């Protein structure tokens, strides 16, 4: 259930409408009657999150999943994929196309424009690029000849679909910064901080203990049911990650078992 709880605890990156994109509103979930299905261990984290989202939608009284992971082909080539098409039973069976996104971004305040400050911890992706791709490529896919043809096979008219995104994110502010401007984005998404190696290797952090979260644990709230190691030993593991230009996500155990999340970046 840690995956489920972590997913449900993650706020949307904005509410209602921004950037020309309407956010899906997740209905309240009664977990007392929810039976989580085992998540296939071989799935990548993004597909695990899709698996979680589908389970939760299936559990709601409001939504019925009509189709998901719909491949759009041009000849033998895949030109895109539609994440979810659901029926809203509370709105006269309105059909909605939902593009699901779950991201981990650091806030780099050295970048001038606030909207461009959200980048991946390894600097390989950014919020702005993903947002534009969703708005300008993924959502319009249903109106292409290939999209229309594919949807017709499942008796769905794209002109009758409402389109939304469900864009969730965990954000990490620079270490030592009290706040950072991310308007119009949701500050409740800030769950931790990021730090460079030279700052991590100082006397303050040498007093703490650490656990390097596995990728499939990134959704989880940090907890004590793991083997934490001291600063000296975690440094060796971080260096190995940095050689491969990967920023590990650490759970930091401080005094009184207070837990924090942070990325130690390599750049």
Image (cartoon, rainbow, N blue to C red):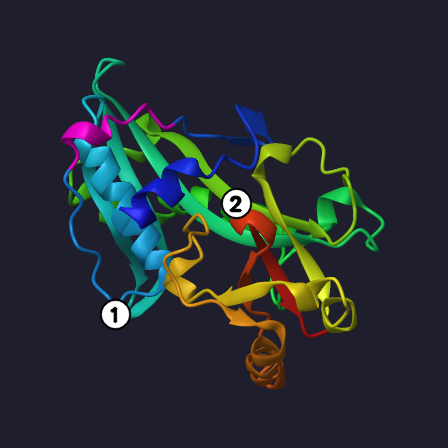
Q: Nearer the viewer, residue 107 or 34?
A: 34
Q: What is the chief secondary structure element of the magenta stretch?
A: loop
- In the image, residue 261 lies at what x, y percent? 56, 54
Quickly name the residue at label 1.
42
- In the image, residue 85 lies at what x, y percent? 27, 37
Q: Which residues are magenta?
A: 26-34
Quickly name the residue at label 2.
169
Give the residue displayed 61% in from the left and 49% down from the top.
192
Q: Secondary structure at mark 2?
A: strand
Q: Is residue 38 above or below residue 95?
A: below
Q: Is residue 49 left or right of residue 40?
A: right
Q: Nearer the viewer, residue 168 or 163?
A: 168
- In the image, residue 221 lies at what x, y percent? 44, 48
Location of the C terminus (image quadrant): bottom right
Residue 242: image quadrant is bottom right
Closer to the N terminus: mark 2 or mark 1?
Answer: 1
Q: Is residue 83 above or below residue 30?
A: below
Q: Nearer the viewer, residue 100 or 121?
A: 121
Q: Nearer the viewer, residue 203 or 51?
A: 203
Q: Is residue 85 above or below residue 219?
A: above
Q: Is residue 248 left or right of residue 215?
A: right
Q: Is residue 37 left or right of residue 206?
A: left
């Amino acid at each position: 259930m840690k995956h489920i709880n972590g997913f449900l605890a993650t706020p949307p990156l904005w509410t209602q409408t921004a950037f020309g994109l309407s956010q899906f509103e997740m209905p309240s979930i009664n977990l007392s009657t929810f039976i989580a299905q085992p998540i296939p261990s071989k799935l990548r984290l993004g597909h695990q999150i899709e698996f979680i989202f589908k389970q939760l939608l299936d559990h709601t009284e409001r939504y019925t999943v009509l189709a998901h992971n719909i491949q759009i082909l041009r000849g033998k080539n895949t030109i895109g994929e539609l994440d979810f098409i659901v029926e809203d039973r509370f709105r006269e069976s309105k059909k909605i196309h939902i593009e699901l996104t779950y991201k981990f971004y650091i806030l780099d305040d050295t970048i001038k424009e606030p909207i461009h400050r959200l980048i991946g911890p390894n600097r390989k992706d950014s919020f702005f690029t993903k947002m534009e791709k969703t708005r300008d490529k993924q959502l319009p896919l249903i109106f292409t000849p290939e999209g229309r043809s594919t949807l017709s096979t499942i008796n769905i008219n794209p002109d009758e679909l409402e389109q939304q995104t469900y864009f969730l994110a965990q954000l990490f502010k620079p270490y030592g910064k009290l706040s950072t401007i991310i308007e119009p984005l949701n500050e409740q998404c800030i769950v931790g901080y990021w730090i460079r190696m030279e700052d991590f290797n100082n006397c303050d952090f040498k007093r703490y203990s650490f656990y390097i979260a596995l990728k499939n644990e990134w959704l989880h709230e940090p907890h004590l049911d793991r083997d934490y190691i001291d600063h000296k030993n975690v440094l060796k593991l971080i260096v190995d990650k940095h050689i491969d230009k990967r920023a590990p996500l650490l759970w930091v155990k401080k005094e009184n078992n207070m837990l924090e999340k942070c990325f130690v970046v390599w750049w």
